[in-house]
Amino acid sequence: MFSAIISLAFLVIDATAVTPTIDNTCPYEVLQTVGSYYLQVYNGSCFHFAVYQWRTYGEADAECYSTGGTLALPKTQTINDFLTEKLLNFYGKSEEAWIGLHDKNDEGGFEWEDHTHVTWDNFAPGNGPDNGWLASKREDCVAIDPMDDGKWHDFQCEEDMITVLSGSDPYKMYICQYTS
């Protein structure tokens, strides 16, 4: 009987040690500065949904980097679906959010913020490498659109005279990802 209780105790301890939670997946600094409501764990990564902050791509990227992360890297359909579902159904947001994808270094050659190349994509028609109109050379940063089934749209990364004159808004929500 005693050995059964000890075995059960070890099973409980072992099960909690491997179950990914906000507390054991998200960086300490993030846990100290971000309310747990805005943190989600999926597939071994911690995601900070900054749905209450509007930043340019560069500002959002710098904020994620300053706490040890990157803008979210939805490299698979399942991660993309997770992000879309959380934005739309959990947080009730319909606006686009920056993800860590851009073609700032090579027009049409999109790469992730972790410097890996795209092997799966979810670009909306007329966006990404297929964006053939003149502004495409200025639209280098990518946001996920929860109202377009999580499709990706490219936008200008930063505010400049053209965004001001055109009424385009480079300020968006963003999602940070922390992976150990």
Image (cartoon, rainbow, N blue to C red):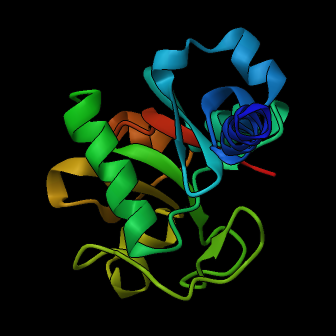
Front residue of 5/166: it is 5
Q: 58 or 174: nearer the eye?
A: 174
Quadrant assignment for the N terminus: top right
| Residue plotted at (67% across, 81% down) | 106
Q: Compared with residue 48, is residue 84 higher up or lower down, i.e. above or below?
A: below
Observer-nearest residue: 125 or 145?
145
Is 132 above or below relative to 164? below
Furthest-front residue in this view: 1
What's the residue at 71%, 47% (across, down)? 18
* Position in image of residue 92 (x %, y %): 21, 28
Q: Residue at x 71, y 38 (%)?
A: 25
Asked if 148 appears above or below 32 in the picture, the reply is below
Residue 102 in sight: yes
Q: Position of residue 125 (x, y in %)?
A: 22, 79
Residue 86: where, in percent of width, then height?
32, 40
The answer to whether residue 166 is seen in the rendering is no
Does 14 sit left or right of 60 as displayed?
right
* Image side of residue 124 versus residue 66, left or right: left
Considering depth in this image, is 16 or 38 the residue closer to the camera?
16
Where is residue 9, by image quadrant?
top right
Determine which quarter of the picture holds residue 29. top right
Q: How many marks?
A: 0
Residue located 58% across and 78% down the image? 110
